[in-house]
Image: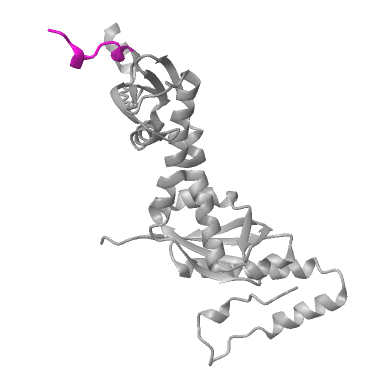
């Protein structure tokens, strides 16, 4: 069978500035990544990677980003991600960097990985808690996460609540 | 009998190398139809690196390219590049249109993985 194969790159936006969370939006991020590819790989690289390039999923609370590109050019994309130094939106520039977590062939595999990763991250946050009330808060939110019948099946398996 | 013993001991091994040479050499000529100041050797190298940077970005500009000889009168040069970077270099030279706001063009006259092959050109043979 001949079909177009894509690669989905799961990354996490890490920034020291808390205001950076507000400006994580798909257009700003897409422009920043495209700009980095143009700088690192030139016109040819930009054209190669832009064929099927979109920001598929974005979570501003946890800074999780899912990018899609063609299978032939995912190496160009992955090698250009460390060169994203700042996000710009509404004439404000916030320094940040992108951590690549996982590269998968379908959205489903990336989602499975993200669920696993979020579970381990929550446990690690629980261990790093300094005071008792934060600990109680996290424990309560962990225990209250459940899959309810009326909400859609795929979206709620991810336990990405705001743990700040 | 001694020969047969030796032949049995030596294993038969066959190696096929697709592209054994590590460098490729190109003879190029720069054409400036509008005339003007001719670039010197350093400016010529800068031009080649600029072409690579435009088409292939910082990764392309970091490709190890050497200008082995350069003649300012005829604007022709011999370039050496790592074999894996030949396609990037040639495509970048082809698509370079402007040199300091003047129109320019690179013509690739000869290319070979061996430098000795660039010394003779059967196209310019005078019979």
Query: Looking at the image, how many numbered discs can be counted on the residues?
Result: 0
Residue A142 position (above or below residue B70): below
As rendered, which of A143 and A74 lies closer to the eye?
A74
Is residue A132 in view from this perspective? yes
Q: Which residues are magenta?
A: B116-127
Q: Quadrant of the C terminus of chain B?
A: top left
As rendered, which of A27 and B19 lies closer to the eye?
A27
Side of B59 where B33 appears, left or right: left
Q: Residue furthest bottom?
A: A150
Side of A98 where B89 appears, left or right: left
Residue A13 position (above or below residue A41): below
Residue B87 placed where, x, y %? 35, 34
Quadrant position of residue B85: top left
Quadrant position of residue A68: bottom left
Residue A131 is a magenta residue: no
Write the residue at 32% across / 11% down.
B116
Q: How is the image coloured?
A: one colour
Q: Quadrant of the N terminus of chain B?
A: top left
Residue B118 is a magenta residue: yes
Q: Residue furthest left?
A: B127
Write the residue at 50% across / 58% down.
A103
Is residue B22 in view from this perspective? no
Residue A106 placed where, x, y %? 44, 66
As rendered, which of B32 and B108 lies closer to the eye?
B32
Write the residue at 57% across / 60% down.
A11
Quadrant position of residue A63: bottom right
As rendered, which of A71 and A135 lies closer to the eye?
A71
Residue A148 position (above or below residue A116): below
Write the residue at 80% across / 65% down.
A128
Residue B6 placed where, x, y %? 32, 11
């Amino acid at each position: 069978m001949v079909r177009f194969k894509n690669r989905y790159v799961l990354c996490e936006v890490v920034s020291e500035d808390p205001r950076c969370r507000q400006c994580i939006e798909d257009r700003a991020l897409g422009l920043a990544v495209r700009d980095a590819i143009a700088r690192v790989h030139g016109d040819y690289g930009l054209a190669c990677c832009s064929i099927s390039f979109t920001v598929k999923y974005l979570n501003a609370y946890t800074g999780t980003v899912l990018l899609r590109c063609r299978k032939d050019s995912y190496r160009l994309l992955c090698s250009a991600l460390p060169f994203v130094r700042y996000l710009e939106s509404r004439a404000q520039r916030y320094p940040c960097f992108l951590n690549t977590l996982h590269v998968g062939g379908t959205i489903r595999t990336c989602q499975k990985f993200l669920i696993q990763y979020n579970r381990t991250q929550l446990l690690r946050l629980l261990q790093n808690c300094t005071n008792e009330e934060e600990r109680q808060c996290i424990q309560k939110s962990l225990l209250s996460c459940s899959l309810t019948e009326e909400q859609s099946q795929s979206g709620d398996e991810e336990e990405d609540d705001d743990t700040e | 009998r001694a020969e047969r013993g030796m032949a049995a001991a030596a294993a038969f091994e066959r190696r096929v190398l697709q592209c054994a040479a590590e460098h490729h050499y190109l003879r190029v000529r720069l054409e400036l139809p509008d005339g003007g100041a001719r670039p010197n050797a350093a400016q010529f190298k800068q031009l080649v690196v600029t072409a690579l940077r435009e088409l292939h970005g910082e990764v392309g500009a970091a490709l190890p390219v050497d200008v082995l000889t350069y003649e300012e009168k005829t604007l022709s040069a011999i370039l050496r590049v790592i074999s894996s970077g030949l396609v990037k270099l040639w495509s970048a030279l082809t698509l370079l249109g402007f040199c300091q706001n003047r129109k320019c063009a690179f013509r690739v006259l000869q290319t070979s993985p061996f430098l000795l092959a660039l010394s003779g050109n059967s196209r310019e043979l005078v019979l």
